[in-house]
Image (cartoon, grey):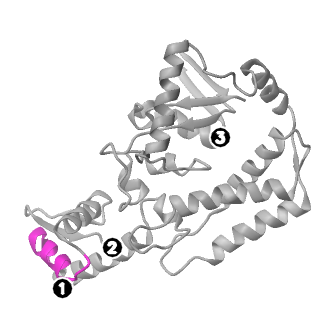
Amino acid sequence: QGIAAIDEFDKMRPEDRSALHEQMEQQTVTIAKGGIYATLNARTSILAALNPILGKYNSYQNLTDNINLPIPLLTRFDLIFVIKDTPTAAQDERLATHILEVHRKRGYPSPPPIHFDLLKKYFAYAKKTAPTLTKEAEERLKEYYLSLRRSVTEGQIGATPRTLESLIRLASARARILLRDQVIEDDALTAISLMNRMVEDVLTDTETKTRADFGVLLGKPTGERNKRVVAMDAFKTLEGTDKKPVERKALKEELMKTGRFNDEDAEKMIQNLIRDGTIYESPKPGFYRRLQS
């Protein structure tokens, strides 16, 4: 019932990540070691930070193209935010001054508003509360969730019930930190505000500018899904009615002729089709067949 703070989240070993899958979904961790097999409770919140693949976030690419993290694990977080290091003269000077003062005084330049010991006691006390949803809060959360579902366009992946559960957890957490035994409308509005921030910042497809596209978290935003349809149509055209193998070079050229792909995008799309098994290499090297549905 605490919090696990993980830095360099993308550098974790695969076996550690597998434990997180179970913990974040079922709130348990299974251990099999030295002849001991046990399932332990792990009701713990996860706060994780990671760096983009190339060291700097590319605003012209979607989230999953910028980070090296398994999609099933990514979708288990309630909130995801992109923090960009943008040089700002005033803010940079303020931060540099603070760091230098900390080193010069060997402590905080000014005392914190609340002492750490008192703050820890406050959090421990707040965790004891178990607020319940009021009718007004329920209506607000339901209205927002349904609005996300209604805004889905053709070919777009919309919000799931997991999104509604995230909203409930966020609203309940705010009520708990304010020592209330009920989740009121104001708590629901704050949770909606946080979710909206993520929707605007992370869940907007960079290509089509489609808002609230939850396919971004799955690596299948609207623009990518549309391109995939174009790619498969091109493949079907090349293989013809006799389903002959398609040469990789010819497929790449056909994709570029559509005007939707440049050289790099065409190569990336072919690799994606191979990786997920949609097409596979025939006995003849450099030629591919389509997995028949």
x, y percent for residue 249:
9, 70
Q: Is residue 148 among what the camera can see? A: yes
Residue 59 shown left or right of residue 6 in the figure: left
Instruction: Please name the residue shown 27% across and 76% down the image.
Output: 231
Residue 90 shown left or right of residue 125 in the figure: left
Q: Which residues are magenta?
A: 244-260
Is 257 a magenta residue?
yes
Viewer-side residue, 133 vs 194:
194
Q: Quadrant of the N terminus?
A: top right
Instruction: Please name the residue shown 49% across and 73% down the image.
Output: 210
Q: Quadrant of the C terminus?
A: bottom left
According to the picture, the residue beneath numbered tag 3 turns out to be 26
Q: Are dots 3 and 2 in contact, CB under 8 Å?
A: no
According to the picture, the residue beneath numbered tag 1 turns out to be 240
According to the picture, the residue beneath numbered tag 2 turns out to be 228
Residue 3 shown left or right of residue 276 in the figure: right
